[in-house]
């Protein structure tokens, strides 16, 4: 499936679905892969990934970006070129109850992923992030290949997300509002 239209055909707006994608990184490091998740939360499609860049974007948390690129678009072949993009490859997919749990986990990752503020080509990077999520859901069959440099970054610290890191009561109100906006939740919905 090289054509993005084919990927959109996989979306079922009535279901929870999680897709793992990868494509080569930018030239000259294109032997390595960049990976990301596409989440279908019953028709609300979002893309979650770690990027090396630090640019202004309405939904980002340091290096963690929500919807920086289109869901099924690879990264630029040449850095900062907005004309040529790698074709994505689907590495894994899950639907149903586990997908719902993964959706919730990924959507909470701005407050639970331990390396939002760090990036290095060897890790932590996009592959560290996707492997961290995979490690928390053994039912997910998608796997990162050897070219996913960074997937083994400090894995002893990334095996499972401790429950305490998901405690949002310690977050500042600004952080909660920023996360809510990124997820399309209104302030009024937060107050209910």
Image: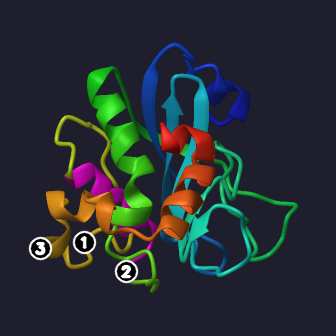
Q: Nearer the viewer, residue 70 or 113?
A: 113
Q: Which residue in the protein does label 2 denote?
A: 123
Image quadrant in which you'd find residue 2: top right
State the image coordinates of residue 183 (x, y, percent, origin top left).
57, 46
The magenta region covers: 124-135
- Residue 156 disc label: 3
Are the residues at dot 1 and dot 2 in contact (C-beta closer than 8 Å)?
yes
Task: Tell me the crowding category of disc 2: few under 14, some 14 to 19, or many 20 or more residues within 10 angstroms, Cα based.
Answer: some
Helix, strand or loop at label 2? It is loop
Can residue 122 be seen here? The reply is yes
Q: Label 3 vs label 2: CA separation?
A: 14 Å
Q: Earlier in the sequence, mark 1 or mark 2?
A: 2
Where residue 19 appears, as percent x and y from the top left, is 46, 37
> Alpha-carbon neighbours of circle 3 within 10 Å: few (<14), some, or many (≥20)?
few
Q: Under tag 3, what secondary structure?
A: helix
Q: Residue at x 70, y 34 (%)?
A: 4
Seen from the viewer's position, the closer of residues 188 and 47 is: 188
Which corner quadrant of the image does residue 186 belong to? top right
Residue lying at the far left in this picture: please name it.
156
Residue situated furthest top in the rendering:
14
Residue that carries the numbered disc 1 in the rendered image? 152
Residue in the picture at 43% in, 84% down = 118
User: Measured along the vertical axis of the image, is residue 110 above or below residue 134?
Assistant: below
Give me the residue at 56% from left, 59% from top.
Answer: 177
How many angstroms separate mark 3 from mark 1 (CA)? 9 Å
Tell us which disc is closer to us: 3 or 1. Answer: 3
Residue 145, visible in the rendered structure: no
């Amino acid at each position: 499936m090289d054509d993005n239209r084919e990927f959109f055909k996989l979306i079922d707006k009535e279901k929870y679905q999680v897709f793992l994608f990868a494509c080569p990184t930018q030239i000259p490091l294109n032997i390595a892969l960049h990976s990301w998740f596409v989440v279908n939360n019953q028709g609300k499609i979002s893309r979650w990934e770690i990027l090396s860049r630090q640019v202004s974007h309405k939904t980002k948390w340091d290096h963690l970006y929500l919807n920086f690129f289109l869901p099924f678009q690879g990264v630029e072949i040449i850095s900062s070129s907005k004309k040529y993009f790698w074709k994505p490859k689907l590495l894994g997919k899950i639907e149903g109850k586990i997908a719902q749990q993964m959706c919730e986990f990924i959507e909470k990752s701005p407050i639970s992923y331990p390396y939002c503020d760090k990036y290095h080509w060897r890790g932590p990077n996009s592959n560290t992030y996707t492997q961290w999520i995979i490690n928390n859901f053994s039912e997910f069959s998608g796997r990162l290949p050897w070219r996913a440099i960074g997937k083994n970054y400090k894995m002893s610290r990334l095996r499972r997300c401790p429950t305490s890191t998901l405690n949002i009561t310690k977050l500042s109100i600004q952080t909660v509002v920023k996360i809510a906006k990124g997820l399309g939740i209104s302030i009024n919905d937060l107050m209910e």
